[in-house]
């Protein structure tokens, strides 16, 4: 990932971080604020997101080069039948609501009543199931509730995760939770994991991996507060990808397996960290 790494000179001494970012990247203060809001800015190797933070002469500031905004024109559909479809959600877009994947797919397919059966976090990429009618959504919600839907996630985490398969069972708010984790590859800096949540707690995988001492790389909500090595800094989003969804079709009775390809930024991170 391309990024700026600069040492603050006398002319910027005492200026706010948002102003320094705007000047260096030749962008508006509003755009500079979005860079800070993404929590990808480091001052002296510490994450800083306060726009009014005053930098001092000699400070080292690092932040990713802002990308040109791109309008998504086509959503990749990986499975479809008369009652539902499964699509590949990019990171950075909501599952439902204004400007969401649900809204984009309604326009793309011409199905105004298309409904997301479940949700993924905005920064999580991967497979998302949609119902073409309310009745099918209700049937699938019951399948999710009864834990009859298989889920497989790919994750890149901080640190050297133990080799092989592990079960993480840390409870949340007094409720049981279980995630099966398999280490695909690892180095001293980071590990590539395959995770299968067996319960449906909110942010379960991210919370469980933090509890195990290996937060998802780029997770700004639950991520580590300690200083990260340079190779792990500047990741734009949490490296979590919903790779597979499997279930028994509630109408046809057939086994359905929907998969989403690893996105470009995930594959690039694996390669950069020598995990692939």
Image: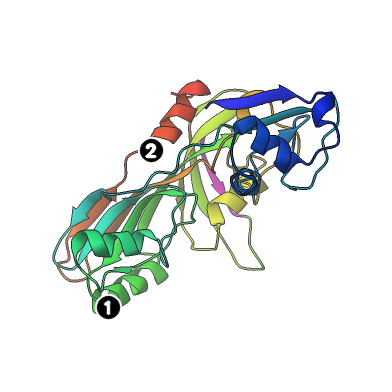
Q: Nearer the viewer, residue 266 or 43?
A: 43
Q: Give the distance between the C-alpha atoms of the residues marked 2 and 1, in whole angstroms.
A: 30 Å
Local secondary structure at mark 1: helix
- Residue 134, labelled with which disc? 1
> What kind of secondary structure does the magenta stretch mostly adopt?
strand
Q: Residue at x 64, y 49 (%)?
A: 37
Q: In the image, is 210 to the left or to the right of 276?
A: right
| Residue 66 sits in quarter | top right
The x and y percentages for residue 163 are 54, 30
Q: Is residue 155 above or below residue 94?
A: above
Q: In the image, is 138 to the left or to the right of 187?
A: left
Q: Determine which residue is flagged by label 2.
A: 263
- Identify the mark nearer the N-term, 2 or 1: 1
Residue 213 showing in the rendered view? yes
Labels 2 and 1 touching (C-beta < 8 A): no
Q: Nearer the viewer, residue 35 or 255?
A: 35
| Residue 70 sits in quarter | top left
Q: Magenta span covers which residues?
A: 163-169
Q: Residue at x 33, y 64 (%)?
A: 103
The x and y percentages for residue 228 are 70, 31
Residue 189 showing in the rendered view? no
| Residue 130 sits in quarter | bottom left
Quadrant in the picture for the C terminus: top left
The x and y percentages for residue 4 are 63, 26
How crowded is the residue under tag 1: few (<14 C-alpha within 10 Å), some, or many (20+)? some
């Amino acid at each position: 990932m391309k990024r700026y790494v600069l040492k603050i000179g006398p002319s910027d001494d005492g200026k706010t971080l948002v102003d320094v970012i705007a000047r260096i990247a030749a962008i508006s203060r509003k755009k500079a604020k979005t860079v800070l809001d993404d929590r990808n800015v480091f001052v002296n190797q510490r994450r800083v997101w306060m726009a009014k933070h005053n930098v001092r002469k000699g400070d080292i500031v690092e932040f990713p080069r802002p990308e040109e905004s791109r309008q998504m024109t086509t959503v990749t559909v990986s499975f479809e039948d008369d009652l539902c479809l499964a699509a590949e959600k990019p990171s950075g877009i909501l599952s439902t609501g204004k400007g969401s994947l649900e809204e984009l797919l309604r326009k793309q397919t011409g199905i105004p009543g298309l409904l997301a059966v479940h949700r993924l976090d905005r920064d999580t990429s991967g497979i998302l199931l949609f119902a073409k009618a309310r009745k099918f959504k209700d049937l699938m919600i019951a399948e999710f509730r009864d834990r009859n839907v298989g889920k497989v996630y790919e994750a890149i985490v901080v640190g050297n995760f133990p080799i092989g398969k592990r079960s993480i069972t840390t409870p949340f708010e007094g409720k049981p939770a279980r995630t099966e984790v398999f280490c695909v590859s690892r180095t001293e800096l980071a590990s590539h994991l395959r995770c299968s949540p067996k319960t449906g707690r909110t942010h379960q995988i991210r919370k469980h991996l933090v509890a195990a001492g290996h937060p998802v790389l780029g997770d700004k909500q639950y991520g580590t507060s300690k200083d990260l090595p340079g190779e792990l800094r500047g990741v734009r989003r949490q490296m979590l990808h919903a790779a597979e969804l499997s279930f028994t079709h509630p109408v046809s009775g057939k086994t359905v397996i929907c998969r989403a390809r690893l996105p470009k930024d995930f594959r690039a991170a694996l390669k950069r960290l020598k995990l692939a």
